[in-house]
Amino acid sequence: MNLTEKLQAAYNQLRLAKRVLIVAHTSPDADALASVGAMIEVARFLKLNIYAYADKKPEGVYGFIPNEALVFSKEPEDLRQFDVILILDCGSISRTGLEARLRALLKAESEGRIVERPYLIEFDHHPLQEAYADLEIRLSDKASTTEIIYHFLKENNLEITKELANCILIGLMTDTGHFLHANSSKEAITVSSEMLLRGASLPKIIDHTVNNKSFVSLKVWGRALENMHFNAETGLISSGLTASELIDLLGPEMAVSLDLFGDIVSFLSTLADVKVALLLREEGDRIKGSLRTNGEEVDVAAIARDFGGGGHKKAAGFSLAGRLSRTATGWKVIKR
Ligand SMILES: [Mn+2]
């Protein structure tokens, strides 16, 4: 199937479905939730019965995204009640929050224990890790998953309403760091300007994604900048934030606005002479690592994969069990 056929096949599957489960990745970002928001609009148009799920959805952060209130962190009941499961922006099956249940379903089918199961459709712009969906629409050259949804709407002659235009623009703006990151392609900007013509509100999105930095989040910025190390030989800039520093600054809830840590590491990668930026932070008994690059020399997704993570060539992440320790030249991850 070529791309047009795939996008049409996805539409036909949705059109024929009665009950649809829409899934975004765990701890969803703005692109993930805007993608779900857009597909909820489509589902409404098709009069589908839907449940939208994102594990660990942050509360009180993304309320400006259309249909955000319809996305629930509570796991859906029996997956077999759905005709279609539409998986958005997940990167891998492990980030669906439903990995064990999806794998159990696929296994039950392959062993002939069930004759019917939901049809799995995936829209994603992360590089391929493992193909598991029945229909995989994976376009890793797209800046956001909402950019894929734009093509889905176009190919199926669906009207791009103001709500849909806002969803598409939110995903494009946030996943490109407001058109500062290397993935800000000509196409991403062309689609964005079309969304403005269709009624998307740039000032409203900027207000919620840029002009909303809180006092505490700037304190975290300050600490991350203070903790920087730069290796002029390798061009690696790194910083680390321990759990106790974060709890001090953010309180035990660790409530942060939008993609705070992503914003910090992206900023570090833009500094002069930096080839790769790495931000490490403790979260519970794990270390979360975020990697960014702006050049073509380094594939940070490959580095992240070495640590069991993944992502894009220019933006990737991983998670390790352990704790952080300061050294004279940077940071060390110590196994617990
Ligand atoms: Mn995305």
Image (cartoon, rainbow, N blue to C red):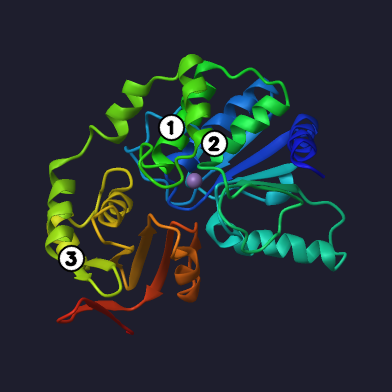
Q: Earlier in the sequence, mark 2 or mark 1?
A: 2
Residue 315 x %, y %: 43, 56
Q: Quadrant of residue 202?
A: top left
Quadrant where the C terminus is found in the figure: bottom left
Residue denoted by label 1:
170
Q: Are marks 2 and 1 in contact (CB under 8 Å)?
A: yes
Q: Is residue 165 above or below residue 79?
A: above
Q: Earlier in the sequence, mark 2 or mark 3?
A: 2
Label 1 element class: helix
Distance Cα–Cα, label 2 vs label 1: 8 Å
- Type of amino acid under label 3: Met
| Residue at the image position 39 percent from the left and 39 percent from the top | 174
- Type of amino acid under label 2: Thr
Distance Cα–Cα, label 3 vs label 1: 30 Å
| Residue at the image position 73 percent from the left and 60 percent from the top | 105
Q: Nearer the viewer, residue 293 or 273?
A: 273
The residue at label 2 has a CB less than 8 Å from ligand 1: yes
Q: Nearer the viewer, residue 106 or 138?
A: 138
Residue 44 x %, y %: 63, 23
Crowd class of label 3 (few under 14; some 14 to 19; many from 20; radius 10 Å): some
Q: Quadrant of residue 307?
A: bottom left
Residue denoted by label 2:
146
Q: Is residue 278 left or right of residue 252?
A: right
Crowd class of label 2 (few under 14; some 14 to 19; many from 20; radius 10 Å): many
Residue denoted by label 3:
228
Quadrant where the N terminus is found in the figure: top right
